[in-house]
Image: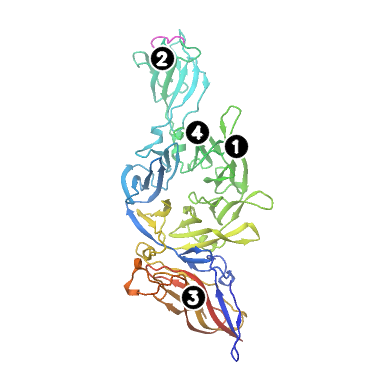
Amino acid sequence: MYKSTPRRRSAAPTQYKFKLDNFYGCDMTNDDSNVHPNYSPNCVNMIRDTLGKPRKRMGYHLLDTKTGNVNGFHTLVTATENKYIIHIGTSIYSWNNATKKVGTSLYAAANDKLSKSIQISGKLYIFDGLKLLQYDGTNIVTVESVAYIPTVLIAKTPTGGGAAYEPINLLQPKRWETFSGTTTATVYQLASASLDSVDEVWKMNSSGVFEKLTVGTHYSVNLVLGQVTFVTAPGESPAKPEPNIKILSSKTNQVYKDRINKCDICTLYGVNGAYDRIFASGNPTLPHYDFYCELNNPTYWGDIWYSVLGQDSAKIVGYSIVDNYLATHKNNEENNANIFLRSGELNSKGEPTFPVKMNYQGLGSISKHAHSYIGNEPVFLTKEGIYAVSSNDTVGNKITALRSKNLNGGLLEELNLENAIALTFRDYYMLAINGEMYILDSQHFMSESSYTHRQYDGYYWTNVPVRCMWLLDDTLCFGTTDGKIFSFYTDIGSLASYNDNGVAISAIWSTPTFYGNEFSYNKNFSYFSILLGPSVKSSCKIWAIYDNQRELILDYADILKYFDFSNIDFGAFTFNVDKTPQVAEDKIKINKVDKVQFILENSNLNEPFRPYEVMAIYTESR
């Protein structure tokens, strides 16, 4: 907080002290004069060091380069080691985590768009909006090439009928049908006409064992009518009531395949809150549909396993889990009912169902790739900022609540917010858009009227050209539109951590505009000091804005440092071994101003920067 306390001296004007001893983040929304004293209207490339004490962010370095958009990085966790793949352009490569380099190409026909993945049953499933892919730790294949073949009808008579057993697989043109043969019938009618093929026909022998028959020798096929004609009537089953004929046929339905292949968002959910089925959506021709797979089997997507949520004027853009419910987020539903909550349960037949239990009114999500969590709160990006699904303490209900008020003044000016990318990294929700990052810090917030309306501290970074980002060994990494793969530095104490691939990072903290004790009086500033966290090497420029001008009032260069053998810089050598925060101070001369704003800056290559406190001494007069 600002602290203005008089310092009385005989025969001299009353001196006042302007002091800040906590820095909690940026406020890009309020006018400079209305920003809370502990927040900054212009805070760039800073992050929390300890609570109330920020530091310059660390930079990043290049790991490897390929040609094309970096579209995704995916991890398969196995019992012995993790396997990594990276999606660049239309290819998916292995990733050598020992060398941090791109490996060999595993698949060359991927969609050149952002991809998502989910691990289930020991395999990784990748959604890129073109083909659903499966990675087993060695190979990548299309799921349709290994899709489960269902038995759709059982115990049919030769003329048809039978009992439904399993639904058609949307990704698989093949399906089995079983028949109970007779001693007279030779023509067996399949469920579909205009078939692609009849692939296999099996008959049970007198010992109760199925044997594969040969086309042309034992039977003929009419694909147009969907019929198999036996040379000799198969006879009755020797193991009644079990059927004695099995027929495998194929009928391609490209529309069915596209329902799953063109999905590009996904999550895990299941009956009673279990995470054992993939839910997928994002098909542009069915924007309000989502689909779910068989229990622990993403090679099987039954043609009746889907939900229609709201109208096609609003598309599904993401998922989150809210109190064991599956929350499905839409972007612009009628009546603002943009979040549908479903539960998983079994019906009277023991079949899984996922009925809608309720929906929330509120703003729609606008980015498929900005859904994540702060603590246990699902957060997502809307046209009015970053919102959370949160508990309303007063009535015990769930509501959507703004969490990014302090960032909105910058965030909502960004173009193409639907392309924003976000993830949770440690205590932070990090959102990247247009080469910039907007960060919410879950460890501190400013409360507004109630718990529900708390606003998290925010930070703003520049020069971070993220197309997609991921965590690797608890390290934040990202890829760019031109095939570059970067990793953020992790060693806070190393001078080499403070650059963006060799480029200096400009870190700024501005105070709000200060009007003194009496806004209409003239102020005369005579002294300024700053307490900076210790570093092997650091510096700080102090600017003042007053009377419509910006003036460099102090330049503390290479004086805020301590000696460390591991980071010897002979150009800035010191024998100082004091690793406590350091004070830099000097006289200044700013006279007859009604208001002033101070700017703390460090833009030097490979220099940390930790502003802990600032103080100025001034007098006032009419």
Quadrant of the rendering where the N terminus is positioned: bottom right
Residue at 46%, 10% in the rendered image: 238
Residue at 46%, 33% in the rendered image: 297
Q: CA distance from mark 4 to mark 3?
A: 61 Å
State the SS at label 3. Answer: strand
Residue 308 falls in which quadrant of the image? top right
Q: Which residue bears the numbered disc 1?
A: 355
State the SS at label 4. Answer: loop
Residue at 36%, 65% in the rendered image: 503
Q: Is residue 513 visible?
A: no
Sequence order check, earlier mark of 4 and 2: 2
- The three-letter code of the residue at mark 3 reads Ile
Camera-near label (4 vs 1) is 4
Q: Is residue 232 magenta?
A: yes
Q: Which residue bears the numbered disc 3?
A: 530
Q: Is residue 248 above or below residue 312?
A: above
Using the image, tell me which numbered label, if any, was put on residue 427.
none
